[in-house]
């Protein structure tokens, strides 16, 4: 018998400034991940991104551009796969934890080895970022 994994679709923000990436830790989770969340019914991805970042960080996104679509086992929901539409964007001000976010932190991209990162971030998004940055 094969186990069917359920899919969780999300839209996330990849914000990199001065070789640091903005990550969040949700309440009740030990994992650091990109800010963002699930779209409402029939909600466009950029609208989801704007709404989730406003709810979670209290700021707006500007200059957004699509980075990619990535999938991995969900960090906090056993038996689920998370599929993320990832957008790069800048923020209109300093991010502050609100809603379900317990912590917000800027992590140095060269010092992420010891951080407890969500599988999607560690295994797919960060390697893609490093690869694209090295290509110029």
Image: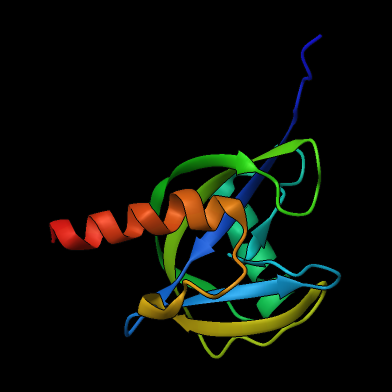
User: Is 44 situated above or below 5?
Assistant: below
* Image coords of residue 69 (percent x, y): 47, 41
**Figure coloring:** rainbow
* Image coords of residue 44 (percent x, y): 60, 44
Count the marks. Answer: 0
- Looking at this view, name the residue that lies furthest to the bottom: 94
Please tell me which residue is depicted at 65% across the width and 74% down the height of the picture.
24
* Image coords of residue 34 (percent x, y): 58, 64
Please tell me which residue is depicted at 56% across the width and 50% down the height of the picture.
120
User: Is 35 situated above or below 123?
Assistant: below
- Looking at this view, name the residue that lies furthest to the left: 136
Q: From the viewer's perspective, is 44 left or right of 76?
A: left
Q: From the viewer's perspective, is 41 left or right of 15?
A: right
User: Is 39 situated above or below 79?
Assistant: below
Q: Quadrant of residue 56?
A: bottom right
In the picture, the quarter occupied by the C terminus is bottom left
Q: Quadrant of residue 129?
A: bottom left
Please tell me which residue is depicted at 71% across the width and 53% down the height of the picture.
75
- Looking at this view, name the residue that lies furthest to the right: 28
In the picture, the quarter occupied by the N terminus is top right
Please tell me which residue is depicted at 64% across the width and 54% down the height of the picture.
48
User: Is 7 situated above or below 16?
Assistant: above
């Amino acid at each position: 018998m094969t186990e069917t994994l359920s899919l969780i679709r999300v839209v996330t923000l990849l914000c990199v400034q001065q070789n640091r990436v903005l990550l969040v830790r949700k309440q009740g989770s030990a994992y650091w991940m990109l800010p963002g969340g699930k779209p409402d019914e029939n909600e466009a991805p950029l609208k989801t991104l704007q709404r989730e970042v406003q709810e979670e960080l209290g700021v707006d996104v500007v200059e957004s551009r699509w980075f990619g679509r990535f999938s991995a086992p969900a960090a906090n929901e056993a038996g689920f796969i998370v599929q993320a539409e990832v957008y790069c964007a800048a923020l209109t001000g300093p991010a502050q934890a609100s809603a379900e976010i317990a912590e917000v932190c800027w992590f140095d991209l060269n010092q992420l080895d010891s951080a407890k990162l969500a599988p999607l971030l560690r295994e797919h998004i960060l390697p893609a970022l490093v690869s694209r940055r090295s290509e110029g």
